[in-house]
Amino acid sequence: MKKVLKRVMATVLCILTLSQGIYANELVAVKEKEADSSILKVDEVTEIVKKELKIGKEFELEDSRLSTDDYYLKKVWNLVFKSDDKNIQVRVDAETGKIIEFEHWGRNDGEVLKYTKEQVRKTAEKYIDDNYADIKKELVEIEEDKFNRYISYYGRDNYVFIYARKLSNEIFKENYISISVSGITGEITGFKIVWDDSKYTKKNSEISEKEARLIFEKEDGLKLKYIKVNKEEDKNTILTLKPVYYYEIINSGLLDSVTKKFYDVEDIYSYNRDEIVYNDAATNEKEAGGLDRGQEMIPEKGAISREKAQKTIVEKISKITDTKNLNIKRSNYQGWYNGIDGKFWNMTLENDEDNIYVNVTLDADSGKILEINYNKYSYRNNDSINRLKLELASGELTKEDFETKAKLMLAAGEITKEQYDNRSKDIEKNAKIDTDALNKKAQNIMSNMFPNIDKKDYSIDIEPSQDENVKAYVKGTRVINDIEYNRNGFSMEFDVETNEVVRFSFEWFYNIEVEEPKTIIAKEKVSEIFYDQVGFDKELIQLKDKDKEEKENVLLPLTDLALVYKLKPYRFSYIDVENGKLLDYSGEEYKDNDEAEYFTDIKGNKYEQSIKLMNKMGFIRETNDKFSPNATLTKKDAIKWIVLTLSRQYEYIPSAKRNYYGNDEISFKDIDEDDEYYRYVVDAVRMNIIEDGKYFNKNHKVTLMEMTKWIINGMGQKDLAEYTDIFAKEQGVADNDQGYIGLAKYYKLIEDTTNIKKTKSRAETIDILYDFIANLEESSK
């Protein structure tokens, strides 16, 4: 490892030395052309932004950063303005001074919405009229769920308006304006524009959606495979597999409406500078401290010892490497693996001298290996010339370009004189992939390592490797009853020169139960189900200017757009092979549980605004787009909405400052875990809104008095409400309810008790809850 580090440091120093001369020349060039530079200075950009966004004197420029991307030809100023209670972040084109994006944050304007989307739409439209009147005729508003692009300022408090570009009556989503408006203040909180000189001319030869569907169907994108399904048994020691149909995307999934061909991913232009990338890579290794190295470690009766497990691993790995000295770095004995209960060893072994890393999981009962991840890191100083040879052999480089680059590498010291003299040797040999030989070699390795696995139990695919050090990528997929189970199998990669295995992975489970359907629906029928369910979108896309990329090493889109057909987004994962039902990722029947964003039956209702605001804040959560505003309130909905409203951590609601503890189980006999209201009833008991009991009576018609008591209880005021003597007496109210009424009036939950014993409609209830939290917020200021 020390030798490797020395090589890496030497390479870095070499690059730095070369770079000093290069950048010195660049700096001189910039200095000479400074007077003619098209990039605006930070003070110039700051003035432009302050004027256009009307940024007041209370804001100071806290940070400024110039970002350039020579590959995409982007030059952007990033500015951050700060006042005592608010920040504004702005991105500006460094050449033109045009604002690309801005976002406001930091000020606490409250948490209860005051404006509906319809009320703030005029604010967004006025901003476009004032600043982008010249392109307004090309803009068309589209819904957020049909946009499928990343917008940073989504949220319960903001309304987002998206205006995509429309050319010759076709939508081009890569050019758009998005504006976010606060539902609390009614002010614009975010803006973004993506626009270029793209153009589109409609062609007479464009195919119809019906023709596009026929092409998709002929591509045979629906495949059979096994998925793991969960069993309800407490001790699940068998992996249960279920055959399903799934859709495998065809190339990019984009079908040209004229050529009737699918584009490759490499054909599509996409600038993803604004995409957020989350590093979700989690290690599979767990530290095991305090290991006893003096004797065999047997974790429990019936399990093999840690040392025997190590011996088994070394024996297996010896089939692909000559290295014998593999030392355990970490080990973990566990009772669970891949959703299965049992006894398992997970070990990480390493050999620093040979740069080998191995992570293995094996069954501690049987000693069978379930999973292997093997890596041998190879460092060679001839990687550059090998890459060049592969590019020549594959046709990526001409002979003339190959010779020119080889000379430059020699001059830069990237290759030796001997490597340069032998530059033309073995080009064909290194580039050519002998699939038959690799197939046979992979089978031999598998039979040596795992003699109980027959070659009929897997299929092999061989693909060219993206790594210039590796000859090819060999992938084996497990096959059961002629259906692939792609969670089990293996992969191997071989060194391009030595042919030794440098990467090997394996996963195989032995205790398997396969669900065997009585019948399997024909693929033609499944295809009909799939395409009927999903449907197609038609939109314009940008293609890469490959000529510019080749000659100038810049990535730009072609000006002319292409019209394509693509599948609409869909959320189910699979189709049942037996009955054609849609399935989710776990193999259960798919249910569309999306919350309704809009209700179709509240227009003109007296409480329309309260319903819209409470729904936007997430306090209604209905999957049906019909709200039934005039229906009488039932207990199940009253409890659900009170729980949702009081669970939000509003500082001015006493209950929101407390954490609720208690059982996740309830005693009610008339509501079970499968009921959509069950989780709200559990929370209501934990929050002391209601008491656990024999029957919940979810369809019981609720009076205003009952609802009032539940709200006061949920606020943690139940004990205070029982001190009835400290409150003024209200006529028509039971003695034990007097405290609740007194507190309800104090919190402006009710004004009088005239209708306290009557039921309320669903719409009235939502209005009461909205006024309740709005009044509390206002009184807390």
Image: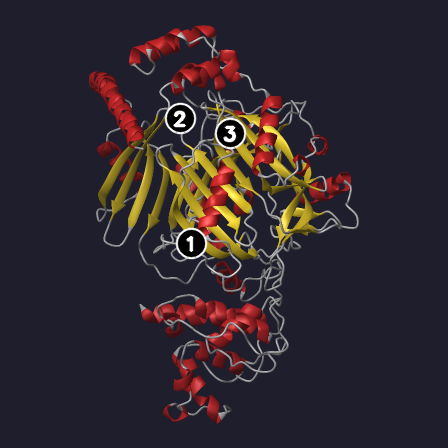
Relative horizontal placement of residue 609, taking residue 654 as reference (left or right): right
Please state which of residues 659 and 175 is positioned toward the viewer in this rendering.
Answer: 659
Q: Within the image, what quadrant is residue 378 found in? A: top left
- Work out whether 200 lies above or below 606: above
> Quarter holding the N terminus?
top left
- Across and down, in percent, residue 384 comes to 39, 18
Query: Disc 3 vs disc 2: which is toward the camera?
Result: 3
Q: What residue type is labelled 1?
A: Glu
Please state which of residues 634 and 303 is positioned toward the viewer in this rendering.
Answer: 303
Q: Residue at x 66, y 45 (%)?
A: 226
**First reached walking from the N terminus: tag 1 or tag 2:** 2
Give the number of the disc on residue 296. Answer: 1
- Across and down, in percent, residue 60 comes to 21, 45
Whether residue 488 is visible: yes
Q: How far apart are marks 1 and 2 (CA)?
A: 59 Å
Task: Quickly name the residue at label 3.
Answer: 493
Q: SS class of the residue under badge 1? A: loop
Q: SS class of the residue under badge 3? A: strand
Q: Which amino acid does label 3 sit on?
A: Glu
Relative horizontal placement of residue 163, taking residue 98 as reference (left or right): right
Please state which of residues 54 and 675 is positioned toward the viewer in this rendering.
Answer: 675
Give the number of the disc on residue 72. Answer: 2
- Work out whether 526 lies above or below 735: above
- Across and down, in percent, residue 676 comes to 60, 66
Relative horizontal placement of residue 251, taking residue 7 as reference (left or right): right
Q: Distance between the residues labelled 1 and 3?
A: 35 Å
- Work out whether 238 lies above or below 162: below
- Across and down, in percent, residue 391 comes to 47, 16
